[in-house]
Image (tube, coloured by chain):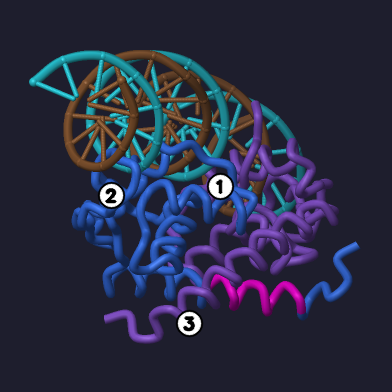
Chain colours: A purple, B blue, C brown, D cyan
Amino acid sequence: MRGEHLGELEELILLTVGSLYPEAYAPAIKKELTEKMDRKVVMSSIHTVLSRLENKQFVKSKFGESTPERGGKRKRLFEITPQGFQALEALKSKRDALWTNMLQIMPNPS
Amino acid sequence: MRGEHLGELEELILLTVGSLYPEAYAPAIKKELTEKMDRKVVMSSIHTVLSRLENKQFVKSKFGESTPERGGKRKRLFEITPQGFQALEALKSKRDALWTNMLQIMPNPS
DNA sequence: TAATAAATTCTACAAATCAGAACATTATAT
DNA sequence: ATATAATGTTCTGATTTGTAGAATTTATTA
């Protein structure tokens, strides 16, 4: 595995992990992506991506305490690492620069 | 073809096409991505993506006039369509909302 | 202990991206 | 006119990223 760039879903999930702190786990991430981003995604995709992000050291995880709910496995809680945050920032600032550039050149995109 | 979302490179190239108007063609896009985004990419990827973006109607293209240069094929010039612009805007506004959320929750990401 | 709920892990597949070779077109030099 | 060099595009196959659903694990309640 090379892991050269941050894919489209990888970036969204990384952002969502940050945005959901400290309760970021797969089902909550799915809900957030669906509701706030209109981004359909199945649970297993989220797990796949989270695992890849953890390999890249952009997130870290631990198991949550058992809560007095209905039952089921313990949550695996994720949080973003400084490296992950930096990766997001780098992407954002560069994309924003292109945006600025584009708007100067074509303020009316019709 | 499903074309459900805008991939990571698709988004960058679409943005670059806008940012380079009216001289957006593959070699110029490669240069821009390399220099402004530190995004390495080979020429053929750019052509592949441009072709996909054209199928999605996010860009349109025409051949450039023959310029008095050293020689070679005519440039295929791309420009972003209103649909393409809207797609970029939608993505940006949603991502920005997640960013705002994340920064409120964790202003110090260490 | 059986049933149910919640969540994660596994397995196979599809789409996006990468990489480099092959090809086509135009201009200049001979 | 023909060969050569420059410029860009298209083709083919491999790798990475994303999708989908079944299977499994763990905990609670009847």
| Marks 2 & 3, CB-CB < 8 Å contact | no
The residue at the point 68 percent across, 39 percent down is A51
Which residue type carries mark 1? Gly
Is A91 positioned to the left or the right of D2 in the image?
right
Location of residue A41 in the rendering, given as x and y in whole percent from the top left corner: 46, 52
Viewer-nearest of discs 1 and 2: 2
| A14 relative to B79, above or below | above
Residue placed under numbered mark 1 in the picture: A7
Q: Amino acid at mark 2?
A: Lys
Residue A44: x and y in percent read: 53, 41
- Packing grade of label 1 (10 A; few <14, some 14-19, many >=20) is some
Using the rendered image, report if marks 2 and 3 lie on a common chain: no
Q: Is residue B93 above or below residue D5?
A: below
Pointers 3 and 1 in contact (C-beta within 8 Å): no
Q: Residues within 10 Å of mark 3 (few under 14, many from 20)?
A: few
The quarter of the picture where the C terminus of chain A appears is bottom left
Looking at the rendering, the stretch of residues picked out in magenta corresponds to: B94-103
The chain letter under disc 1 is A
Chain letter, disc 2 residue = B
For the residues labelled 3 and 1, the Cα–Cα distance comes to 28 Å
- The residue at 37%/59% (across/down) is B24
| Of the image marks 3 and 1, the number of the one nearer the N terminus | 1
Residue tagged 2: B75
Q: Residue at x 64, y 50 (%)?
A: B38
- What's the distance in space between the residues labelled 1 and 2, CA to CA? 29 Å
- The residue under label 3 is A104
Residue, far right: B110
Work out whether residue B45 or residue A104 is closer to the camera in this orientation and state it.
A104
Q: Nearer the viewer, residue A61 or B22?
A: B22
B99 versus A5 height, above or below: below
